[in-house]
Amino acid sequence: MKKSPPMQKTNSTQIALPFWRQLGTKLIWAFVLLGTLPVLIVTVAILNRTGSQATDQVYNQLDSVAELKSDQILRWLDEGDLTMSTLLSDPNLERFTNLAASQISNPQERTRVSEILIGAVESQYFKRMFIYDENGVIVASSNFADIKKNVKDQPYFNISLHADYIQSPIFDPATKQLAMYITRPLRSGKIQASGVLVGELNIDTLANIMTKRTGLGESGETYLVSLQNNNLLTPSRFEGYGMGVAYHSEGIDQALEGKKGRGAYVGYRPVTVFGSYVFIPELQAALLAEVEQSQALAAYRQAQWVGILIALISNLAALVVGLFTSRSISRPIRALTVSAQRIGAGNLKEEVVELRRQDEIGVLARAFQQMQHELASLYQSLEQRVADRTKALATTSEVSRRLSTILDQKELVIEVVNEVKDAFGYYHAQIYFYDEANENLVMAGGTGVAGEKMLAQFHKVAKGRGLVGRAAESNRAVLVSDTSQNPEWLPNPLLPDTESEVAVPISIGDKVLGVLDVQHNITDGLQQEDVASLQSIANQVANALQNIRQYESTQKVANDLSVVANVSIATATITDINLLLQEVADISKKSFNLYHAHIYMLNENGDTLELAAGAGEVGRQMVAEGRQIPLDSEKSLVARAARTREGVVVNNVAADPDFLPNPLLPATRAEMAVPMVIAGKVLGVLDVQSEQIDRFTEIDVNIKTTLASQVAIAVQNARSFLRSRDDAERETKLNLITQKIQSATTIEAALQTTVRELGRALGKNTSVALDSSALTDKHNV
Amino acid sequence: MKTVRKLLVVIVIISLSLIGCNSGQTNSQAVEQGPILIGGALCATGIQAYLDEPGIKGAQLAVEELNKKGGILGRKVEFVNIDGQSDPKLVEKAAEELVKQGAVAIIAPADFDFGSPASKVAQRAGLVGISTAASSPLYSSTVLGDKQFTLSMWNTTMGAAAAEYAYKDRGWKTVYVVTDDFISYTTSLSQYFIAHFKSLGGTVLSEDHYTQGNGDFSAQLARIQALETQPDFLYVSSYMPDLAMIIQTIDDAGINLPIVGGDSYDDPGFFSALGPKYGNNVFFVTHSWMGPEATQDMGRFLKLYEAKYGMPPETSFVATGWDVIMVLAQAMEKAKTTDGTEVAKAMESIEFNLLTGKLKWSTADKGHEPNIEAALVQLQNGKPSFIGWGKPENLPAP
């Protein structure tokens, strides 16, 4: 068969993948992801961290500023307090305070006290200092204008009589300014105060403290908000936010509730601020330190931008690196893909690309190359195998065709073995058939000299022995691809070159007829494929064999029927019954190819079967012995056939315990007895014996029964003939006697003649005596 | 690609958890330490309740205020009171339960008899114990242990302050003293008053006695009336309910002398029992004054109190409840720990500025004697009014 090129796919676009499926694209993606994601994550993490850190930092700064301011305020108040204490410990004032304030009535005293107060004011902590009595009337002051004024309505008046007090900033309607006071009750060693020393704090200091910059930047500020009216106690840094207005913000409100804290919220200006807040009880005011969020986070925002920039740059870098790397990886893979697709399309000739690369792709390319070569050689061997197979099929069909015309088993065998050997180029082929006993496999034919020799030697193999025996027994092909590897294989000296052997059963259904055995002088020269072909041939052989056997059996029936016809013809002219029966026995044995044939006749009493004729010398001997069988003999086939008026067959006498062997007929294996019946009357039995087991079939019974019937008719005819001939002779004799008697002239002569003739007619030993008295009755003979 | 995806997912998860950790770190530390538990074994029911129940309210308010400002040492504060039910045994049990629950300090009832069992438990557990207002000098570190305090002035101060006010402010030189001898509080108070009054130069005309529950003051009244010269004032050391009866009896007898006493007078039941008719010319020394004119911080406290409870405080014992919490807070902040020993040392070293006046304790070996201002209050028309704070320079020996 000529090698035809495999289907070539029209694959002009070798890689028809959409770009997002392409390896290169995926690699670029992976690179961008791997290059960007960590940077992105780290950037986000850092930004998140620095973001919270930046916020924390801002809060911490605000907290510390708030704390600082708060401390400064408290220190300022403490200093005022200290000034008061110092003043109260002044011996001059002490003397004074031991007096009831109301006692400072004398102007001289008042002037002296006022001078002390003026001196104290110089410390700058206080704007002014004054003393009032328990009724609130100012009795001495650093500012003479205050004297006689009443402070009873001032919020600090009541408590000032009892406790050291710091008056939180209040709006003084007189000065239209904020004022703060520190008060000390003057007890003069008693429990109930007699007056109060008051110092008005220089509240500008508070504003100074609060508005002094503390590194909070352009938008940062600290300020105080009064609990009383939510007014600013210290001026705003920003224009348009006056002091006489109530302000609210989350920070202000929280602090005025007494809470300390921090947060991002919209400040009193409509700007989001970070704030730290605390309530200062001494001022009854909230202290807030705030900075605009945008300014506080400016540095952080910058860092954020840098981070984003870095992420973008790394993204770009990853893209570029990814582009190059993916190209360097995907380009050879694409080329290889083209090669692979080419190989896939069946083009095995072109060289695979990228073979010289030292990386995995090179390995892959070389593997592809190897695969291509493997495929090519596989392809070629496949073609060889297809050719072989085709040849095998052709041989099979050829064998089959030829077998169908062969009607001779021998010819068939020779034809098959030679055809098989020649067609497949085997070393040897041979066929075995089961012998008649189904015990051994007898060589039926083989190729070459070896085959002839073995045939001449009647080579046979016991069932189950060797490949042939095993194949026959198991009804399965037995293959030994390498005989040297199989210890059970038995070498045949006539076939020294055998390297592999297969034995294929020739069978129809479960019935094994024989074995086709094939040998090759090449190791592994016989394979499973050969087995299939040979099995197919063996099946054809089996069929042919079946045909032949069927043909033979048909031939045999025809032959048998012609024998029956011949017997009929031969016996028709024989009037001597014994001669007739002898002829039947002889022709039967000869024509039917039997071991023995003989005929029993039922005697006149109908109770015994007497041997009437037997084929050959043995038969004559047995007839001479006068053998007979009682009709009621249970064991006798012959008797049974006569009783039942039907043919009786025993196809394997060895298996029949009732069979009585005849020493004169030792080789008998099968026996058949058919009754000779005419008009419902049994005349006798035709008994035939064979050396073959299973020799007799239903057809044989029918044919022999027919034969027996013919014989019976012949016997009947012969008997009738004999009887009528006798009658005629007697008639003739009677006529002669009658004539002689009538020719006698005397009675005496007549009687003499009668006796003589009767004696002659009845036999020589017959004596006839006449009694004269008998003459009286003529019919009494 | 699947492995790459898995890898990416893992990276993202790890990164996110790292970010989460960073932002959550400061929070988790605070959670780890949990709130600071201050236990109270104050009596919300029974005869002691009129002193302790206001203390509970004050303490609760103080805790709220502290938490507003961020708690103690950055930790939230919790105050849990288990009712001692005016039974020393139950007070002890309550204190034990609080120690079990992890309290770092115990607030004890406002009386030596009821408060000391709680303080003893606290001392055994190594914790600071502090009574809101037990005024017995027995409430000292020498009796109860080196970590035990009382916020109240001792009776020495209470008696002395009354003596000073009478002698110095009022110039009263003679006194007739009636002492309710039913409990030790009244007897010891009289004892310190007399000692200090005498030391100032005053004269005690007579030391008379009364027993709570008698219900009859006629004998004592007769003895007062029988005096040759009437005293400048009467010092009556007793308590409700018989106290109101005594004052009414004196007033009904036409004796219009000023009557002076201790903190047992600081009782709304007493004020209303006297009413405008008898509620005049009565003076007493107590822990604080519940008016804005008392101290710098009182105004704010009163506002907070009213905002929380819907009414102004009726007695100064709410202030002692507030103050004990603030004292502990300040001491813990200074000690930078809640450890009992350290907190006790801090308490010894700080001069506290409280609603109940300025307070400084002596060291443990000196008995934790409270050096605190006493508040003097006057009843006018049945209503109390504040006179001022007094702190005797020399105290009678306890």
Image (cartoon, rainbow, N blue to C red):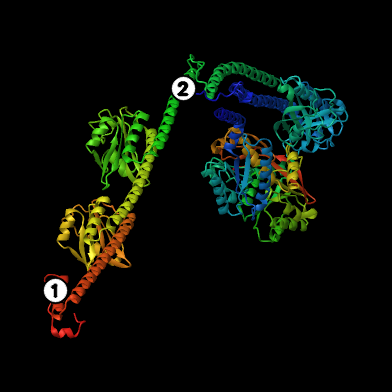
Residue neighbourhood size for the residue with mark 1, other residues' Cα within 10 Å, grouped as few (<14), some (14–19), many (≥20): some
Image check: A370 left or right of B384? Answer: left
First in sequence: mark 2 or mark 1? 2
Of residues A693 and A673, the one drawn nearer to the viewer in this rendering = A673
Work out which quarter of the rendered image holds the C terminus of chain A and state it: bottom left
In the image, farthest residue toward the front: A745
- Residue B322 locus on image (x, y percent): 67, 42
User: Residue A605: which disc?
Assistant: none
**Is A69 situated above or below B273?**
above
In the image, farthest residue toward the top: A356
Q: Nearest to the eye among marks 2 and 1: give it.
A: 1
Q: Quadrant of residue A373?
A: top left
Whole-number angstrom distance, CA of label 2 to CA of label 1: 120 Å
Q: Residue at x 30, y 64 (%)?
A: A677
**Is A431 situated above or below A675?**
above
Q: Which residue is mark 1?
A: A756
Q: Which chain is home to disc 1?
A: A
Q: Which chain is home to disc 2?
A: A
Q: Residue at x 55, y 25 (%)?
A: A7
Amino acid tagged 1: Arg
- Residue A195 locus on image (x, y percent): 79, 35
Q: Quadrant of residue B274?
A: bottom right
